[in-house]
Image (spheres, rainbow, N blue to C red):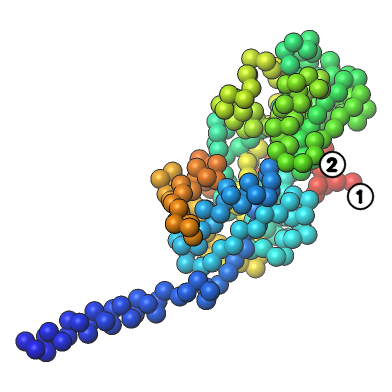
Amino acid sequence: MKNKALALPLFSFLLISLAACAQKPAAQLPTYRIGYMICNSEQETLARFQPLTTYLSAKIGVKFEAVAIDTVNFTKEIDTVDFTHTNSLLYIMLNRYHGVESLVGDKRGALLGHSKGMVVTLKKSGITSIADLKDKTMIFGPMFAPTAFMSQIYAMQKQGFDVDTDLAFYTIPTGSFKHEKVIYGLTLGKFDAAAFPYYDYELMVEQGKINPDDYLVLAEAPPIPYCNFGVTQKVDEKLAQRFKKTLLAISGSDMAEMEDGERVKILERAQVDGFIDIEDKDFDIVREMAKATKMPPYQEQ
């Protein structure tokens, strides 16, 4: 009986010791950097995606670090990151020049894994067609935001309209939250037409910031993939597939525990509804539009 009594504590001690050895301190874990494209601001981007990054670290057993990168700097910074989270135009640039491969797409809003660009005017403007924009003014979103610039240029070209020669003037706002600035710029009557990304328009309607009855859509571009995660060539294939599988399995109830003890709903904070499988061929429509509008990576030298 005495030997049995000693054996149980000893066995428990061995199990605890083995478990402790199996769990490496965070400082000893390999570190991988996820480059998140800045959407509205660096602070907002990191606030959105830090819980997701923390969750991935815990689930996969490595240390992931979130890095916010501006769209115009992403190609310069690509060698400093292992995974990417970008829009579809930036993805085809990184794929062409740096071999980044797509893993999963964001699912968000009514169009799920897609978004589209629209050319919009106010109903009270009296403008009812793209042709009516001749010698008028227009505001676009950021040039590297595919559904705030490229898509609208593409849709207008399809109707024989050249923004460089047919508009009296067009501009792109500066600073943060550019998509909202575009929508408000039209709403306040500062421009005759505007380039709306469908998702931002949909979100502002849901939030009660704008009234959809005020607007008339003059043209729509084809839906294209929304934002997506990609992986660089230096990442092991097994890790890339674990990363992909973990993202696809995330549900609305999954939480991340932050360093301060706060528990956060991952998808809610990231402002996505989930993730979907996506392949490189799904971006061919983006390549077609970029070629037609001479956008990177097909710009004229």
Q: Amino acid at mark 1?
A: Gln
Asked if one can make out residue 281 in the rendered structure from this viewpoint, the answer is no
Residue displayed at 77% across by 41% down: 175
Up/down of 242 relative to 292, above or below: below
Nearest the camera: 105 or 184?
184
Q: Which mark is residue 294?
A: 2
Residue displayed at 90% across by 27% down: 169
Residue displayed at 70% across by 17% down: 216
Q: Is residue 253 left or right of residue 165?
A: left
- Residue under numbered circle 1: 301
Q: Earlier in the sequence, mark 1 or mark 2?
A: 2
Quarter of the rendering occupied by the N terminus:
bottom left
Query: Gap in Å between the C-alphas at discs 1 and 2?
Result: 10 Å
Asked if one can make out residue 71 in the rendered structure from this viewpoint, the answer is yes
Residue 80 drawn at (x, y percent): 70, 65
Local secondary structure at mark 2: loop
Structural crowding at the residue carrying mark 2, measured as other residues with C-alpha within 10 Å and reported as few (<14), some (14–19) or many (≥20): some
